[in-house]
Image (tube, rainbow, N blue to C red):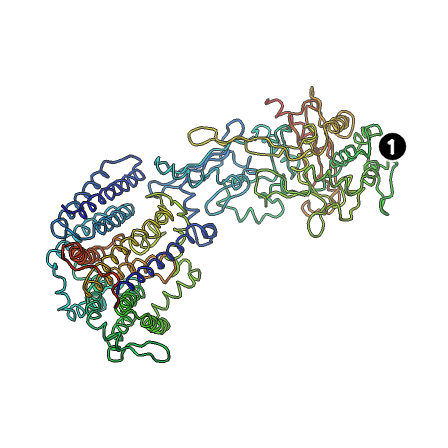
Amino acid sequence: MNRQIVKLFGFIVVLFAVLVGFTSYWSVFDAKALKEEEANKRPLLEQQQIRRGRILAADGTVIAKSVPKGKGDALRFVRRYPEGSLYGHPIGYSFVREGDSEFEQFHNDTLVGENSEFSSILDELTGRNQEGNDIVTNLDPLAQRTALSDLEEQGFGAVVAIEPSTGAVKVMASNKPYDPNRVPYELEKLNRNKIETPLLNRATQGLYPPGSTFKVVTAAAGLESGTITPESTIDAPGSIDDEGHILANDFEEDFGPIALDTALTNSVNTWFGQLGQQLGNDKLFETMEKFGFNATPPIDLPEDEVEPSGVSGEDGLLTARDPVDLARVAIGQERLLATPLQMAMVAAAVANGGKLMKPQIWNRVVDPDGRVTDRLDPSEYSQPVSAETAAELTTAMEGVVSEGTGTNAAISGVQVAGKTGTAETPGNAACGGGEEENQAWFIGFAPANDPKIAIAASVECTEQFGNDVAAPIFADVAEAILNGE
Amino acid sequence: MSSARNRELTALVPVAVLLTAGFAAVFAQEDTRLDNLSLIYGAYFLAVCVATHIFLRIRLPNADPYLFPLVALLTAFGLVMIYRIDESLARDQANWFVLGLVLFALTIQFLRDYEVLERYRYTIAAVGLLLLLAPRLPGIGEQVNGAYLGVKIGPLAFQPAEFSKIAIVVFLASYLREHREVLIVGARRVLGVTLPPLKHFGPMLVVWGASMFMLVFIRDLGSSLMFFAAFLALLYVATGRFSFVVIGMAMFAVGAWFITSTVPHVHDRVEIWLNPYNDPTGSGYQILQSIFAQADGGLFGKGFGQGLITIPGTHDALLPAAQTDTIYSLIVNEVGLFGACAVILIYLLVAARGFKIALLASDGFSKLLATGLTAVFSIQAFVIIGGVTRVIPLTGVTLPFISYGGSSIVANFVLLALLLLISDRARREATEPGGRALSLGERP
């Protein structure tokens, strides 16, 4: 009988091995899918028991915190946003039932203190509960407030301000704002609002025709590729023939042969249209892509809440291989759409000697004991233009503010470089379908000789021009930041 | 001096240390301060174990030295888990642990000549079947989750299936010891399949019928599977005919399939097993939550006392029957895959020691009894762990020595006592000068 007993034991070993196999499958191999299962409320319930870390502005202002509710086993934490709608974008919200968005979603693991398996064992041995880490952002409260209140005066739109040398995002404001504290009560109502779309972060999801602000990119491509020099001139008549269409200057003004400085200062369409034609698809798209177009901007927000900018085709964004009307792309029209974040990146790259830093909202992570465990390490995304080209562009952009189309961006005592933009958006449903509606823009940086801040401001549905509505916002926000330093 | 008992004593020390550490962990979790109560609990546990050890030293000096420490380890682990769920349940469990040890001692004291069991095998079988039927008797029967597993007489409630499994193994071991020769010799080959002789086919049919009967009347697929698997294991060991096992399995499968498709409760259980997501908040809730709890455990678990059992702020169960059916899921949740593997390994070590006893035993009855008891114990662990991990349909069988439940603890200590009795005799005969030589190569 002994042989059978040994075989029987072997069979039991096999049975137990099956148990180990199934347990491994559920607990490790299939665990991720199971945690995302609709019927599984465990991850949410557990997160609710963790004191989620706070989110702070650069000066320590509390933007988001978790407050305890209930006692003992019933203890759970609820998210509060003391500043209300001021930071609804880009911070977003985090609630058990409604889920999370924007910054709260992107940095979720850090905020709940999700550690590696090994360090959680260490926590267990030291008898310590999982606690969330605080995150200090780069957001500047005064500038953020200025941006949002200016926008609320001018209309729907967005402002993004980036420190050129580090990529630190100091302002990201979107009008119409929303109060994240209201999300548990009126998420559905907020979602239903298709006109004001308060949950849409216009800074990263608002796709607008960039208009003349895009001429900075066209000029960069011209200088960088050697197609033009700062001295070379192009004859700029009142209008030119563009693939059978007419492309004209404002009031069909004839500028004659002029160089880059004059062309940018006066935002001459026929000059930049011809430059675009001379550049060709490859050179223009190469520079665009180095500035961040045709890709999701590398910012610390969820990928599905950040739109890539570019020339939109029927199946996504067009590339250098697709036929486009180059003259009109070169002046920021055609089917070209850009987010305020993208245009702020253009300004920041020029301001930073041609180096584009990855824009980041977070600055540092502080653990529950007050130790800084992680700090933003500024990293370069690309170098769209050389330092020399950047200096030449800066000079041209200074002319725009000192004597050209963007004089309202001037700040007393500070040299400003920038570019206005006014794209006609007749029949835009979001603006109520009026025929006189424009998308007004201003991008720029200050001080021009030692840039501390690069800003893009964009206003929807206005009958006015970039210099009238967007340039003053730039000046206010830039002043708020420069005065605070 | 007995070296086996010294090894046992040495093995008990880490068990008590583990128990103390476990309680300390729960205390640290609940009060965020270390309470010296954990040391007191650890000391009590060690004292009870040492008392049992001294008893074994006197009565069964040659018995297997590892079984008792292994079982003590399982019990200690169970106590900590239950304590973590509900303090008062742990107090009950500790009392049953002591009661189990008393019955353990009584069994060893009065059943030293356990062959006496053979003489009463039909009585024992009848008692075993009666126990199984008791939950269906009016007045004392109790239905739990659609299955009839409990009996309630006044304040005393117990699960008779836990005791009847021992009775039935005793009967089968005795019956097969006597009839194994004829089962082997009388076998015929029909169409290439070796069939047992018709004359002796009857009793096998009775056993098959009994387990089918259990399915219908007690409505518990788990117990039915456990009994029938133990029967097949014994049949295989006794006769060495694998074909008998295949025939038995086929018969069980056909019967189970037929009953599954006709008895609604059993059918539901199988349906939930196959498609738990059909009703995630109703009938599929328990198995789904059991699996979600495991998914949350990962490799190392969330730590003792960290897992969620009820929905915070309410008394609604997030892991239904955490102290009984789904205790294994809670183990995976709190100590992770590694902890769960350690638990499975302990069961495997118990099985290894049990089968070792069967190998060492010299007479047929002892061999079969040790085999049967070990098999029924291991399969019980498989049925419930398999149930909560969705290997098989989930049924209400307890996880031996770990699950909350007096019947389970007490019955399994009686089972352990029988194993140690067999072991003591086998090892004494093997080591005695002039004793019977071992015949490890013995063939049926």
* Residue tagged 1: A255
Whole-percent x and y of residue A154? Answer: 66, 35
Query: What's under tag 1, amino acid-wise?
Result: Phe
- In the image, taking residue B169 as reference, residue B115 lies left or right, namely left
Given residues B16 and B244, the one toward you in this image is B244
Whole-percent x and y of residue A262? Answer: 82, 29
Which of the 4 image quadrants contains residue B6?
top left
Where disc 1 sits, the SS reads loop
Which of the 4 image quadrants contains residue B375?
bottom left
User: How many badges with numbers are in the image?
Assistant: 1
Which of the 4 image quadrants contains residue B110?
bottom left
Whole-percent x and y of residue A101? Answer: 53, 43
- In the image, taking residue B187 as reference, residue A98 lies left or right, namely right
Whole-percent x and y of residue B251? Answer: 33, 74
Given residues B3 and B113, the one toward you in this image is B3
| Rendered position, B29 above or below A188 | above
- In the image, taking residue A174 as reference, residue B268 lies left or right, namely left
Residue at (24%, 44%) from the top-left corner? B15
- Does residue A103 appear in the picture of this structure? yes
Quadrant where the C terminus of chain B is found in the figure = bottom left
| Rendered position, B276 above or below B201 | above
- In the image, taking residue A70 as reference, residue A100 lies left or right, namely right
| Rendered position, B412 above or below B39 | below
Quadrant where the N terminus of chain B is found in the figure = top left
Outermost residue, front direction? B434
Assess disc 1: are there few (<14), some (14-19) or many (≥20) residues with their C-alpha within 10 Å of its C-alpha.
some
| Rendered position, B442 above or below B353 | below
